[in-house]
Amino acid sequence: MIICLRKPKTYNIMNANNKPIVVPWDFSKLSIYALEHAVLLAKTLEEDIILAHIVKRKSDIDISIEKMKKVANEYKKKYGIKPKIDVRAGSIFSVISEIINESNATFAVMGTHGVKGMQKFTGSWALKVIVGSNAPFIVVQEPPITNKKLNNIVFPIDFKFSAKEKLIWANFISRKFSAKFHLCYINITDPSLKRKTFSNINISKKYLSENMVDYEIVKLEGSNVTEEAVKYSKKIDADLIMISTTRNISFQDYVLGASEQKIIVNKEKIPVMCINPRKGITRTGGVTG
């Protein structure tokens, strides 16, 4: 792995007024799946798409740019949207975040196929890429269903304070896609955690009602909110599961498997939107994180 100490060479940098969708691109079928999902989002949001390709050596940049130009032209013919490209040398764990943050991206859409592949955009290492970004990641395992929109989104609620930040994005997605949110929780016996969970539920109800977001409250069976949320998502044919990542995740979490990793690579292969907790007011305003 090579980490560039100088600012990487780039191609086709976005202007400051654009809020594109970034797709990490490694020429795999998973990156194709991610691009197909991004196209559907981009058409609704009326935003550009950046294909972000990371190489190990600066000497590889020029030839990679030519390959990426061909990819962009190919998908312009296929989808009617020509992706912009950004090719840099360095580590995927830092450079992907640089591209997302510098371009002021709305989302990143990334493909994964489980815990295989240490240097690809996959598995436990995908979480390390995700938590370094200011923008939410939508992680996909399969191509989108043709013309299927974001209609039903599962929104697990627990005792974490970061649940409030998810509400900001729920409001954003509701306004853009007219989606319904399923606020799910499990029964908790610990009095303190139960109190915090119901506090988050009440805050969620109030916020979503005030912003006229369509939602329902669902009590799940079982004791593991991650597992039960995936089961419920399968039951209602959900289009997306929305979660918050954990602050300051340790290396051991990557190796052993944090709860976020388990839901990201869920066996039902439902797309997962991962929101990184940030301090202060988020892009749509209204709730502190």
Image (cartoon, rainbow, N blue to C red):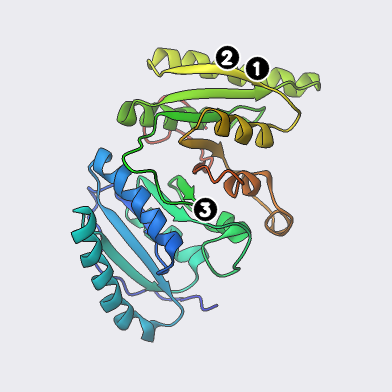
At x 31%, y 31%, the residue is: 176
Q: Amino acid at mark 3?
A: Ile
Quadrant of res 259: top right
- Quadrant in the picture for the N terminus: bottom right
Q: Amino acid at mark 2?
A: Asn
* Tag 3 residue: 130
Q: What's the residue type where badge 1 is placed?
A: Phe
Which x, y percent locates residue 169? 43, 32
Residue 267 x %, y %: 61, 46
Residue farthest right in this picture = 190
Mark 2 lies on a secondary structure that is helix
Q: Dot 3: few (<14), some (14–19), or many (≥20) neighbours within 10 Å? A: many
Is label 1 in a helix, a strand or a loop? helix
Q: Residues within 10 Å of mark 1 (few under 14, many from 20)?
A: some
Residue at image x 24%, y 48%?
A: 18
Q: Nearer the viewer, residue 134 or 171?
A: 171
Residue 272 percent coordinates (x, y): 51, 42
Q: Compared with residue 207, is residue 226 higher up or lower down, i.e. above or below? A: below
The image shows residue 80 at horizontal and vertical percentages of 18, 53
In the rendered image, is residue 104 in sight? no
Front one among 122 and 269: 269
Quadrant for residue 245, please give it: top right
Q: Secondary structure at mark 3?
A: helix
Spatial CA span between label 1 and label 3: 28 Å
The residue lying at 60 percent from left, 68 percent from top is 118
Task: State yes or no: discs 1 and 3 in contact (Cβ < 8 Å).
Answer: no
Spatial separation of the CA atoms under disc 2 and disc 3:
29 Å
Q: Which mark sits nearer the N-terminus, 2 or 3?
A: 3
Q: Disc 2 designates what residue? A: 202
Residue beneath disc 1:
198
Q: Kindly check if marks 1 and 2 are in contact, taking CB atoms under 8 A apart as contact.
A: yes
Circles 2 and 3 in contact, beta carbons < 8 Å: no
